[in-house]
Image (cartoon, rainbow, N blue to C red):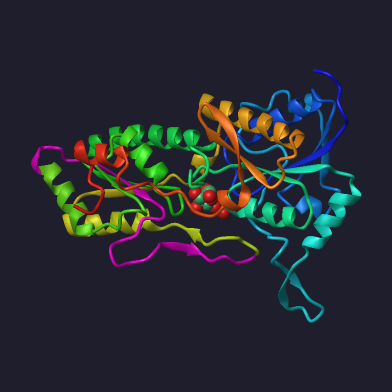
Amino acid sequence: MAYRNTKRIAINTGGGDAPGLNGVIRAVVLSAYNRGWEVYGIHDGYRGLLDTEEITHLTPALVRDILPLGGTLIGTTNKGNPFEMPVTNAAGEIEVRDISDRIVSNFKALNLNALICVGGDGSLAIGYQLHQKGIPVIGVPKTIDNDLSSTVVTFGFDTAVTTATEALDKLHTTAKAHGRIMVVEVMGRYAGWIALNAGISGAADVILIPEIPYDIDVVCRRLMEGKLQKKDYGIVVVAEGAIPKGGGLSVKGGAVDGRQEVLLGGLGEHVAQQIKERTGNDTRFVVLGHLQRGGSPTTFDRLVATRFGAAAVRAVEEEKFGHMVALDPPTVKYVHLEDALSRMKQVPLDSDTILSARDIGICLGDE
Ligand code: F6P
């Protein structure tokens, strides 16, 4: 490729990690290097731009072997929004301050031409605010939850669903051996994509998702029907953000200590307890938790990550600042960050996946 004007571009990864982040970093570095540009990795989300010692010049040699690796070479965090940063004041009290100017001035001092922000809705929203303050930002969507509306899918989701499906396969054998009901809590926040896709692929009997408030009596009735059909074990997949009819979210911790969102959790244990009490069945629960975020990305996620990273560099070249790359098969398009962040993507209730689940007799907790 012909040598063009040299650029210095920065990349950061923010929010919860997702398998494929390293694939994006590698593709950005290689695509930039092939244009004669330099890439700088900002450590731990936006923190590396507050303390500029946390910046690494990323060379092709540094990223050569990282495509199959989970995690992120440059670290990440889901704490610390620079526009609302909790800081300790002179009186020793915690107060919330906007320290984003420091990021803008450090970015300028480093002579950077663009910032590629790889993140979910929270980190991309911060990226968009920085863009409005003059930093040329390109967004790359990242989430295992699959809850970003403007892209058909992001990297990380396929790996998370694969991990959850493999876990369900294993739980089937032990559930059957003991005649037990296994309740499996999966991630996904306010969207039921992981629960639904893994639940169907892992042959669950019941799947509870945030989009369909559930009735525990309906769930128990269905499990008892299975018993009558001489199937004395069952698999119940519970999305962490599922809610009972007339009830609320199961929350484990608040949005404290600079954490951007509340910490969901506890629903699997609660549902298992209720099933045990109501049916008398031997019931256990498993929380898959961060297993879904770890490990080597699937082939699909490596490919999407690579396409996103390369597309982000093309977006810098085309000066599409304020936009996010998004998968729109057969291509990767650019969507304005404001549009991309305007709504969450939940499972549509009229989707064929929901209809298919019902058709094959999976209980979704409502009927
Ligand atoms: O958004 C990704 C996600 O993994 C959610 O599915 C989950 O609710 C949350 O992050 C967990 O966050 P933490 O890493 O702080 O435990």
Q: Tell whether 166 sits left or right of 30.
A: left
Location of the N terminus by quadrant is: top right
Question: What stretch of residues is rendered in magenta?
Answer: 228-257
Q: Is residue 13 above or below residue 308?
A: below
Q: Percent from the top left, x then y, of residue 203?
A: 28, 34
**Residue that appears at 78% across and 64% down:** 99
Q: Is residue 144 above or below residue 62?
A: below
Q: Percent from the top left, x then y, of residue 132?
A: 73, 56
Q: Residue furthest bottom?
A: 91
Quadrant for residue 326, please give it. top right
Secondary structure mostly taken by the magenta-highlighted segment of the chain: loop
**Residue that appears at 18% across and 47% down:** 223
Q: Percent from the top left, x then y, of residue 71?
A: 63, 38
Q: Percent from the top left, x then y, of residue 272?
A: 29, 54
| Residue 171 seen anywhere in this rendered image of the structure | yes
171, 252: nearer the viewer: 252
Is 162 within the magenta? no
365, 138: nearer the viewer: 138
**Residue that appears at 66% across and 48% down:** 14
Q: Tell whether 292 sits left or right of 183.
A: right
Q: Residue furthest left?
A: 228
Q: Is residue 95 above or below residue 330?
A: below
